[in-house]
Image: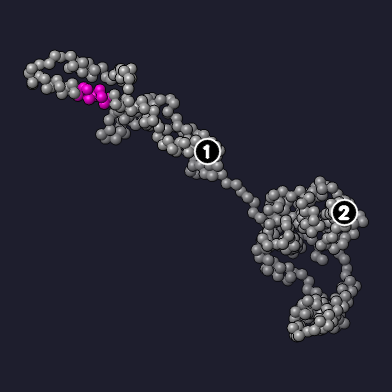
Amino acid sequence: MNADDFLELLSDMPQDMIADCAVLLAKPPSDNASVLMPRIVSCAAAAACIAAVSGMGYLLKDDGMTQQSSIPEAVMQETASAADSVPVTVQQTTAVSAETAIPGQTDTSVQSAEEVPAETAAETVWIPAETESVTADTGKAEPERITVPEITGDLDLDGRFTHADRLWAELIFSAELDGVADELPLTDAQLRQCDLIADDCRSPLGEAEYNAFQQTAKLIYQYDVPAVLNVRDYLGQQAYYDDYIKQKEVKPWEDTRIDWEALGLPAHPTEAEFLSAVDWHYALEHAERKDEMTSDEKTALRKKCQSTVGRYMEMQAALYVPQEPTPEQQACAGLTNIIQLYVRSRHEARYGEQAWSWFAEANFENVPLLTQDELLAKLEAAKEWNFRMNDE
């Protein structure tokens, strides 16, 4: 502390204390010990008082020891280095009123609000940007949550399963099979909705996933399952829903119009008898001596099943009475053909060869070849379709 600082501190002392000290120090010494001792004690007290005030003032003038510097230096350095933080000014009251002061605390430790310097009355606290949101209940900041849509097979991202999702699945899977899936304008959110089965061999949409879309559509639009069902729900209880469809569908071996005896079967065949007659894989698996059958015997079994299937299909064709599709059903079937034609045209333009498709050959004679934007517009319109699918 220099002389100017000392004089400044003296100027802040009460005037009566300074006057008393000056009077005591100015009196000449006396040989009388009874007079000298009180003066010595008084002078010592005055000096101690001045020293105490000086020491306190020195501490208060030290920038690193003020009461307002309540945040440790290490913490300030750590938080100030956060480049992605947001500064928030927090008012901090350090004054302690005389009524609430701690017993035994001296007046020198009490500061009023007016005594706090303007530059230290506000303290800057750095709060990470991700904690800016404040809850209404507690008023405390909490991390901002990013909601990621659940994977439900909602390919058009409208929050529900519709005919459009089934048609999107048709487009994606067909494009995957024909090697042009990377040309589709799929967003990251749509690709995420394709990730329904972890071990499905194809990407973005595998065969099992594609079939799940078709079954879900059949449940909702053919067998009147509530529309809240989605592809994830179907896969979660696939055995139950497949059995439900099986029970709803007309069982071919129960069709009394077929002359089963002409096919070498009982008049009322069971499911096992029907499958053994028309499905040679099933017949071979359930043959009594399958492990002992020779190659010629297996070939003969296969030819017999194929012959039975041919005659059975001829009987079905003779009895078949097509249902007149509704305009909506016609539009849906037409859009399916448009999707297949679009995918095949993209394959031929890219590879210079005719595309192979998983799907049955369709008649594209009157099917228009759309641009990508025109196709996307039709898929957008399909969101509003709510018609019942054909029972065939």
Q: Quadrant of the C terminus?
A: bottom right
Compared to residue 67, the image places residue 320 above or below, namely: below
Q: Position of residue 188 (x, y in %)?
A: 69, 49
The magenta segment is: 45-53
| SS class, disc 2 | loop
Answer yes or no: do the residues labelled 1 and 2 have beta carbons within 8 Å?
A: no
| SS class, disc 1 | loop
Give the CA distance from mark 1 to mark 2. 56 Å
Look at label 1 and name its amino acid: Ala
Instruction: Please give the name of the residue rendered at 75% of the width and 81% of the height, measured from the top-left corner.
Output: 286
The image's mark for residue 352 is: 2
Name the residue beneath numbered marker 1.
82
Residue 328 in view in this figure: no
Which circle's residue, 1 or 2, is located before the other in the chain? 1
In the rendered view, does 254 fall on the left or right side of 239?
right
Q: Position of residue 78 (x, y in %)?
A: 48, 38
In the rendered view, does 196 fall on the left or right side of 116?
right
Instruction: Please give the name of the residue rendered at 24% of the width and 24% of the height, measured from the top-left corner.
Output: 49
Crowding at mark 2 (Cα within 10 Å: few <14, some 14-19, many 20+) = few
Q: Foreground: 51 or 245?
A: 51
**Residue 1 forms part of the magenta stretch:** no
Q: Position of residue 16 (x, y in %)?
A: 23, 17
Quarter-wise, where is residue 263 in the image?
bottom right
